Each structure stands twice: as C-alpha cells, then as structure tokens.
Image (cartoon, helix red, strand yellow):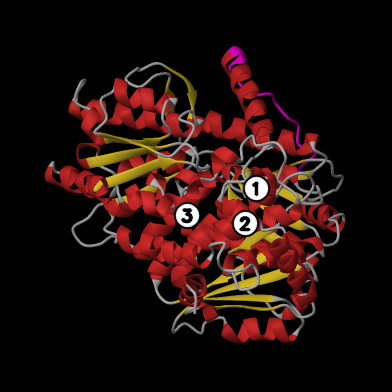
Amino acid sequence: MNAIALKRERLLAGWEHLSVNLNGYGPAVDSALEQMSKEKVLSRIWTHDHTVWKPDPDEITNRLGWLNIAEVMLDNLDDLQALSDGARADGYNQALLLGMGGSSLAPEVFLKTFGVKQGHFELAVLDSTDPGAVLSATERFDPARTLYIIATKSGGTVETLSLFKYFYNQVEAVEGAGRTGPHFVAITDPGSRLADIAEQFDFRAIFLNDPNIGGRYSALSFFGLVPAALIGVDVAQVLDRSLSIACASESCVGAIDNPAAKLGAVLAELALQGRDKLTLVASPPLASFGDWLEQLIAESTGKEGHGILPVVGEKLGEPDLYGEDRLFAHLRLDGDDTDDAAIDALQAAGHPIIRIRIHDSYDLGGQYFLWEMATAIAGHRLGINPFDQPNVESAKVLTRELVAAFAAEGGLPEQRPVLVDGDLELYGDISADDLGGAMIAYLKNAAPRSYIALQAYLQPGRELLESLQELRTSLRARTRLATTLGFGPRYLHSTGQLHKGDAGAGSFIQITAEDGRDADIPDEAGSSESSLTFGNLKAAQAMGDRKALEAGGRRVLRLHIKGDLQEGLARVIDAVG
C-alpha cells in the first residue's frame, strides 16, 4: 500500500459516524461529488484558489486562514494559560465577554457545553444592547474582580464599543482613573480601532487574530479559545479533534469519501431542489452549537437570491407538520436517545436526514471545522461567495442615520400604528379590526415553502424564551412553515444577512416592548457625557433593520407590547391559535 493510500485509510477510520439518508436525492449528491472530483475542488480550496467560488479574489483569498488555524493555535497555548493564571493570581475570578456574532457565539457554545471548571472564571457573554440585559450584567459582575474581554474583528462594532465604554466607566468608578487597564483584554485584528484603544488604555492583554479569518469562521482562533481557556476547557484537546477532521477533509481523501465534501454537497444539492430549511436537532448538552451553526450557514449562504435557512431550537413535531422544504441534521451524543424515535419517524415519512455521531463534548472541536468546510463547499455548488456579507451594511447605514437624527432632534422618527388592541400596537402593511384578525391576515399571505422569522428586541430570559418558543410552535402548526427565533440586535450579526439576501419570501414578526429601565452610553470611555442610551440604540437598530427589510420587499409586522410582556405574548399566541 503506497503512502497516500495508507494515509487515506487512516484518515477515514472512525468516520462511519457521519451518515446520510437522502430518500431519493442520492443521485444528485453523487453527481455533485463526482463533478467536484473532476474539478479538483478540494485541492484547490486547500491551496487557497479563489476561483473555486468567484473570479474576483476580493474577500476570498484573505478569508481562508481558518483552514490551518488549529495548527497555529497549538503554538499559542502558553499565552492563553498565562492570561488565565496571571489574572487569577491578581484576584480576578469573573469574566464578561463583550462581543457580537462571530466574536460571541463560539464562546457561548464553550460556556454552555462545558460549563466552568472548578477554580476558573465565572464567565458570561453579553451580546445585546437591551438596557435590561446590560444592567443585569452590571449587577452580576463585580468590577473590582472582573476581567472584561472586548472582542471584535473589525475593532469598530458599535454594540461592542458601546459596551466597552459603559463598563470602562464602571471599573473606573471603583478602581479610580489610571487603574483600569488590567481589567481589560482585547481580541481583534491588527491595526483595528480596538487595537489602538487597547494600547491607549493599557489593556492587560491584546490578542491580535489572523486577519485572514472571517468572524463566523473564527471559533478555533483567539476569539473562541481565549474565553474557552478562562473557563478551564482543555483547548489542546479541542484543537486535536479539529485537526482530526481537517485531516479527514484533506484533498488526498477523494470527494466521494470526504466527510466535509459529502456534507457540503448534501446541503447545496438539496437546497437547489427546494430542501433549503436545514433543521438542526441536537442532543440537549450540544444544543448551543446550533446558535453558532446558524450564523455560519445563514451568513455564508444567504445572498444573491440563495439561502440555506438554519432552523435551530424548533420543537420537534409529527412528520405531517413539515413541508417538503426540510432537511434534518441530527447531532447525537453517544448514549442519548432523546430524539431517535422522532428522527426515525421523519425518515420513514420521506424526509432526508443527516446523522452525525458525537462521542463527547470535545468532538465539537471537529464539528467546527467540519461545518466550516462543508459550508465553503456548499457555497461553491451554489455559485456564491461564502465569505462576504453584502447585505449586512444596509441595516447598519439606516441605524446610523437614525442615531444621527436622534442626536439632532432628540428622538427617533415617530410611527403611527395601524392597529391598537389594548396594550398591543401593530405596525405594518395590514388591515384588520383586532389582533386576531391581523395575525390571521398576515399569516394567510405567507408564501408557500417560505419561513417565519421572529425578531425579539427584548431582554433574553428563560420565561420569555419559553413563551417565544410556544409562539413558534403555534405559528408552525397554523402554517406548516419553518420558524426561526432571534434576539435583536444579536440576530443582525447572524441571520440578518440571509433575511435581506435570500429570495425574499420570508415573513418577519418583530416584537418590541417598553424598556423598564435604561442605561447611558458614555460618549467616550472615562467621560460622564452621554448623547445616547442603550434603549435608544436598540430602538434605532430595530427600526433600521425593519426599514432595510421593507426596502428589500420583505413583509414585516411589528408587534409592540406596552403592558406586561408575558401577558402580551400570551395574547399573541392565542390570536395565532
């Protein structure tokens, strides 16, 4: 046996835990894999050939650093350990990560999957401009013993820098001027605005990430691994699992046997044939992985009229609740049979199923790479660039204009509701006499094989999440459409690109409410002057995204709850029926 064949055999060992049951779609996937083999797609990806996706190299050749990041990060383990050891020795035992999108989702997965190892940092992730969420974090974390991780690739993310300025002032109020630097850590790209801020304020540490990695592909870089190390995750083992999958996905493993190629071909070919709602079902300990995967797939594929919609956290139902636009992916942890019967029933009913066996939590290191490579391959088959986000800026521009208008006029533009029903105000292109009539009319006009996206500009919490999930279940039962749920402004950095870049058939229900309390955003770190509150910023972001969706021809219904939030949601659920 020659060396290449031997390596191939070793790499494929154990990969029986990725299997697909395509129920009639197999020939299309096999044809795609054969074509990729002829075009040498895998070897071209590994050599950073941008023509795999587009003839123009912009935002492609400088976005492929994730291919080799696990090897690079193995050389940085000492720096991660030094940060954790040094901060703990100085009396810090809490850590608050401030970031959005790719800078926050992987840390959240590590936290929710592994928890905090004894003797390590109590960590939380704050990726919201909701003033209630900001103030709750303020109350939970003691500035005197908290390490604040400021994470943004661009270095200029408005939410992240607003949070930095706010918490900088919290620390300064306790420690005094000139003694704040040791409380802060930056993760960013070289030359960014945050890198300059970190130097100016003498941060404890500055981790400069590989600039050739896009945010949603950065899980195994400093963005994911700095917080993982702080909570005691064995980072070396995470990277080893990633390298195992990377090796199994190398070009010496032909496309037909290559797990990433197979997964990518399934995603793309089924999407092209109408199965474009990727519904993730994960064992409960792995559930948070879906939030990271949601951003990766939505932001990578939702453009140029295409889009694979990730459906995450939707309660499993009977097979007849689902249309012929679904593809199910089951991430099953060894020993967990929670969803086996439901998945088998879906397969028997004719739905295609991807099954991935997860041995333990550290296998997520491999899953990060597997899905990144599969998404890149799906982008090739869809004819899109999976590394850009051309429609994200539209909502940002409108938000900036609204913030400027607020500064000039002291308020945001007023809108008149089309319907007031008790404590509920409805905004949108709809005519009805009451809430029930409005919801029925809105849902009746939803396009077949489309989806309904709930966008909640509210403070995340367990009770609220349960109510919103109940609303999702009611919406699916009435329409048989896929449903998604995102908290604003978090979803803007996740599914927001797909919402504005796909074919445009989605229906959007934006939910807002009165803020019970608010918090000022300092104009500058260390300044007592403030021109904007977090409540103002959140309202501008909600309005900006709504305007961007409407400008793109999307259907948007805004529900504003002025009274008790839970009572208002209960009324909406009843109205949906």
Front label number (1 vs 3): 1
Q: Is residue 87 visible?
A: yes
| Location of residue 272 with respect to 201 vertically, above or below | below
In primary-sequence order, the first of circles 1 and 3 is: 1
Q: Judging from the image, what secondary structure is the residue with disc 3 in?
A: loop
The residue at which mark 3 appears reads as 461
- Tell me the kind of residue under disc 2: Thr
Characterize the local packing of mark 3: few (<14), some (14-19) or many (20 or more) Cα atoms within 10 angstroms. few
- Tell me the kind of residue under disc 3: Gly
Q: Judging from the image, what secondary structure is the residue with disc 1 in?
A: loop
The residue at which mark 1 appears reads as 386
In primary-sequence order, the first of circles 2 and 3 is: 2
Depth check: give the residue in front, 66 or 216: 66
Query: Which dot marks residue 449?
Result: none
Q: Are marks 1 and 2 in contact (CB under 8 Å)?
A: yes
The residue at which mark 2 appears reads as 375
- Tell me the kind of residue under disc 1: Pro
Characterize the local packing of mark 2: few (<14), some (14-19) or many (20 or more) Cα atoms within 10 angstroms. many
Depth check: give the residue in front, 468 or 68: 68
Q: Residues under labels 2 and 3: Cα distance? A: 31 Å
Picture coordinates of residue 210, whole percent (x, y): 43, 39
Q: Quadrant of residue 488?
A: top right
Residue at 40%, 28% (x, y): give it: 194
**Residues rendered magenta in the picture:** 408-423
Residue at 31%, 60% (x, y): give it: 236
Residue at 47%, 54% (x, y): give it: 461
Characterize the local packing of mark 1: few (<14), some (14-19) or many (20 or more) Cα atoms within 10 angstroms. many
